[in-house]
Image (spheres, grey):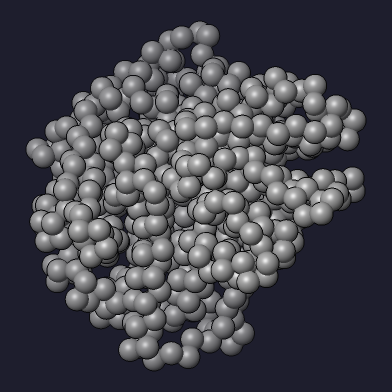
Amino acid sequence: MCGITGWIDWKVDLTRQQRVVEAMAKTLAFRGPDAAGIWLSPHAALGHRRLIVVDPAGGGQPMIRRRGEQEYIISYNGELYNTPELRQELADRGYVFQGHSDTEVLLLSFMEWGPDCVRRLNGIFAFAIWDTANRRLFMARDRLGVKPLFYTQLDSGFLFASELKTLLAHPLVKPHLDKEGLAEILVLGPGRTPGHGVFCGVKELRSGYSLIYDHRGVHLSRYWNLKSKPHEDDLATTISKVRELFLDTIQRQLVADVPVCTLLSGGLDSSAITAVAANHLQATKGEPLHTYSIDYEGNDCHFQPNSFQPNSDTPWVNQVSKYFGTIHHSVIINTKQLVESLIPAVLARDLPGMADVDSSLYLFCCEIKKESTVALSGECADEIFGGYPWFHNPETIAGDNFPWVRLLNERMKLFSPDVVKQIKPEEYQARRYRETLEEVPHLAGEDSHKARLREMFYLNFHWFMATLLDRKDRMSMATGLEVRVPFCDHRLVEYVWNIPWAMKTCGGMEKGILRRALKGILPQGVLERRKSPYPKTHNPAYLTAVRHRVLEILHDPSSPLLPLINKRALLNLANSHDPVFPQPWYGQLMTDAQFFAYLIQLDAWLRHYKVTI
């Protein structure tokens, strides 16, 4: 895993812009702490920061390969899980390899198949290749959007980078927000419209898209999307295929030249990954797997079950670790750490995020990085198999809005009436919702209920899952930790997409088909455990701390947050100690404490990035 950046310009001599390119690449040092490199030519410059996972000696970047008079240069962030197959096919076609990195395999794949190479890739990636002969840049992002990639156009050129901070390091890119960017932050945040870069003129290359930039400008192409078709396999065959795809995915993603661990919550998804990884590691290397869990100081006495978090993880973690003989590490976060890390989490994400849900993950990854460089995590199973509560709530299914977004009007009352009038929250949210529904690949002949469930899955893929993947990438890579997400294997996603809802919930349980596929792999109790999300703190000291910090901000006349908020309403709220939100206002975890923490992050973001509106 790495950080990438580049600059194409038809009028500026980029061989004289080394300092600018180095400054941009330097902002990605935490993504790639092990090595750095830049490549310069008169009209193209590529920068790279490397986190070494495979082929320490032969995988340096930017990587250059030649074929006759043609020269190709790549800057790549990601992992290919079908490297052996691609390597063999290229060798059969006469290519000679200088190392064993997936970077070289990817570059030679482009040289052989051009832009169509992306259709052959199984992995998580964001990369850019400069073709010197044709003076053309090619970029692509993986099918599910696990790895980030942003870009912007200049008067005579084009910039790209793994992260927004890198683009902002260029002197011609300014941190300016228009009404739409402000709506992204205040209305949709911590989510973000697919393809939207928030800052004026900045865009995100969407998942499953490639891009060509040349003298004619930017040309976007969608190389992958979900395809709806009748599911013809019976239940037994479906269970077998899900199991087969899952096992193959895990084994592919365990390949690394550095230590690999798993994140373990004791839930179905992380336990399944842990089970396969532990068995594989013991069988191939005779070594135990290291596993990691997170919890919070005070949760042992303050945890209260609810419909979103029915039980505590700790007993389940201990059971799974003991069952598979893992070396387990329990990371305990205290309130002071959680509050103090809200700001580093903003700087990692470049935007206000999921408050302490982000900052706790950042702290968690810091601890994991002390022993491991690669971790496998259970993200995305709920989006793919339908595990979230909103998939099972008739009222939510019948709704006409993003199911994880709630209490918009109540939140907007806490912001400046003038700002709210400008950004038109309900209208903006409704527009983004309708745009997404227009993309859904419906299946002809489906009844209205099945068609609506298909819409629900599509919404989750491109919004909620994207937010969680962005969170996982930023918080982990900010610590130099690579996190792989096996449930995002596109083969598994494509197959499960068309499994009928009745089959997905076989046995009357959420993710029933996955539970059946894991029978014999996991202990029965874990197989039957109800979904419980990523844990958060239940310690009332945290709510007290973030309320106090918000009051400090409200009494600071220099705070850039003040023009955006309804100060009187927020003062009353922060001083009253009454509950603000009766249910999560975003996702499953973000309630009162997270709203105050989000305001803290918003204030810090406006200050640090010197955002203008």
Residue 293, how many percent across, how many down? 22, 45
- Would you identify the image quadrant in which residue 611 lies? top right
Residue 259, how many percent across, how many down? 32, 46
Residue at the image position 44 percent from the left and 15 percent from the top: 554
Q: Vertical placement of 562 versus 381: above or below?
A: above
Residue 495 in the figure: left or right of residue 226: left
Q: Vertical placement of 266 versus 520: above or below?
A: above
Residue at the image position 63 percent from the left and 48 percent from the top: 127
Query: 461 or 123, which lies in front?
Result: 123
Residue 301 in the figure: left or right of residue 19: left
Residue 609, how many percent across, how many down? 58, 21
| Residue 412 appearing in the image | no
Residue 602 in the figure: left or right of residue 46: left
Q: How many marks?
A: 0
Residue at the image position 43 percent from the left and 10 percent from the top: 555
- Would you identify the image quadrant in which residue 481 lies? top left
Residue at the image position 37 percent from the left and 77 percent from the top: 244
Looking at the rendered image, the quarter that the C terminus falls into is top right
Q: Vertical placement of 599 versus 242: above or below?
A: above
Query: 380 or 37, which lies in front?
Result: 37
Residue 162, how many percent across, how many down? 59, 39
Kindly give the residue lying farthest to the top in the view shown: 557
Q: Vertical placement of 306 versus 151: above or below?
A: below
| Residue 325 appearing in the image | yes
